[in-house]
Image: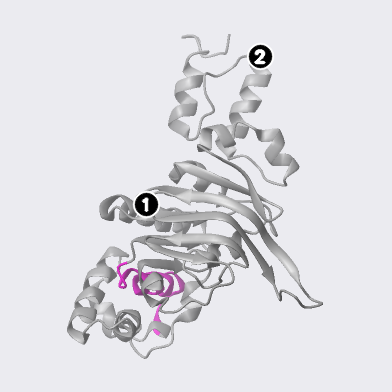
């Protein structure tokens, strides 16, 4: 098990007049090599939960186990560096964190901070720059001379250079156009599969959750409302609507088709291929639904 949360709770400014509860009784596990999407309306606790996954925040109630390290509420914690090396987080607009004078130095900063030699850090930089779809020649350029999309890839390369075993993605496509979003998400999925990463995606995009995740954690009011396969979660369109969430576009099209032609698909479709396959069952050779 990569990460396990048990009855986790968190209060901001605990025991003060400004105390605010963000998480309560959160119990969920993220298995090794799995791809999980965390969804929920704004204020549901997603961002606070995310910061517990590599001990940026420590629980005020319950416990969290990250690999072989157990973190209990109320206990002082030391030597959290190893956790933050093994669990990498790509925050929204990661390019805002670039600061070095060259791309090479920026990518090497993290590994060097974790005790990696300069030679190994530079070798990692040469490898990860290719993994994010950029050429090695860009390493000597200033990151601030690059396009916005290139800067984001450089920032992602900096996280990958630390060779994390768990990759947490916090709305990693924010601000990108549809084409750029697909490229970045496909890149992460290819890395997930090739490196056997445990990937945790925090997203408002139901399309991305349906396309990439094998498990969805639905947050509501600071706790876990539901955990399940995307097909099961998105089958409950009315429940999601009550939480202010939409089902993926392909699921909405399926529901409209079923209602218009008074038919029922065998499953909730998560992509266009599945949708066309199900529709074909109700379309005779003439091309109109029966």
Task: State the image coordinates of residue 196 (x, y, percent, origin top left).
Answer: 29, 52
Q: Is residue 7 above or below residue 54?
A: above
Horizontal side of residue 285 vs 13, given as left or right? left
**Residue named by callout 1:** 189
Task: State the image coordinates of residue 282 (x, y, percent, origin top left).
Answer: 53, 13
What is the CA distance from the residue labelled 1 to the residue labelled 2? 37 Å
Write the start and end of the magenta stretch as one range: 145-163
Chain-order first, disc 1 or disc 2: 1
Q: Is residue 255 above or below residue 209?
A: above
Counting every numbered tag in the picture gives: 2
Residue found farthest to the front: 75
Q: Which residue sits at x=51%, y=46%?
A: 209
* Between 33 and 263, the one nearer to me in the picture: 33
**Residue named by callout 2:** 262
* Between 93 and 261, the one nearer to me in the picture: 93
| Callout in the foreground (1, 2) | 1
Q: Which residue sits at x=30%, y=79%?
A: 111
SS at mark 2 in the image:
loop
Task: State the image coordinates of residue 34 (x, y, percent, origin top left).
Answer: 39, 48
Mark 1 Cα shell of 10 Å, populated few (<14), some (14-19), many (≥20): some
SS at mark 1 in the image:
helix
Q: Is residue 5 magenta?
A: no
Q: Main secondary structure of the magenta part?
A: helix
Q: Is residue 279 above or below residue 160?
A: above
Horizontal side of residue 165 vs 264, given as left or right? left
Quadrant of the frame with the C terminus? top right
Q: Is residue 158 magenta?
A: yes
Tell me whether the residue at label 1 lies in contact with that at label 2, contact meaning CB atoms closer than 8 angstroms. no
Q: Which residue sits at x=38%, y=56%?
A: 188
């Amino acid at each position: 098990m990569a990460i396990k949360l048990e009855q986790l709770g968190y209060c901001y400014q605990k025991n003060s007049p400004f105390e605010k509860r963000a998480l309560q009784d959160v119990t969920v596990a993220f298995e090794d090599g799995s791809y999980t999407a965390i969804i929920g309306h704004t204020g549901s606790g997603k961002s606070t939960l995310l910061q517990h996954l590599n001990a940026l925040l420590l629980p005020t109630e319950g416990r969290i186990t990250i690999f072989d390290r157990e973190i209990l509420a109320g206990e002082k914690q030391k030597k959290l560096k190893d956790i933050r090396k093994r669990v990498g987080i790509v925050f929204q607009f990661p390019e805002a964190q670039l600061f070095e004078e060259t791309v090479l130095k920026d990518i090497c900063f993290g590994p060097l901070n974790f005790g990696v030699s300069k030679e190994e850090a530079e070798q990692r930089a040469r490898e990860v720059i290719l993994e994010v779809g950029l050429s090695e020649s860009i390493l000597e350029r200033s990151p601030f001379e690059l396009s916005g999309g290139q800067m984001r890839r450089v920032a992602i390369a900096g996280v990958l250079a630390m060779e994390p075993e768990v990759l947490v993605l916090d709305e990693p496509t924010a601000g990108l156009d549809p084409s750029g979003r697909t490229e970045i998400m496909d890149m992460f999925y290819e890395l997930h599969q090739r490196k056997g990463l445990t990937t945790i995606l925090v997203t408002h995009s139901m399309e991305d959750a349906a396309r990439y995740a094998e498990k969805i954690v639905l947050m509501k009011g600071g706790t876990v409302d539901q955990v399940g396969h995307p097909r099961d979660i998105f089958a409950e369109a009315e429940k999601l609507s009550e939480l202010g969430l939409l089902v993926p576009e392909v699921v909405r099209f399926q529901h409209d088709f079923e209602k218009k032609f008074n038919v029922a698909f065998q499953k909730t479709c998560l992509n266009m291929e599945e949708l066309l396959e199900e529709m074909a069952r109700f379309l005779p050779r003439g091309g109109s639904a029966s």
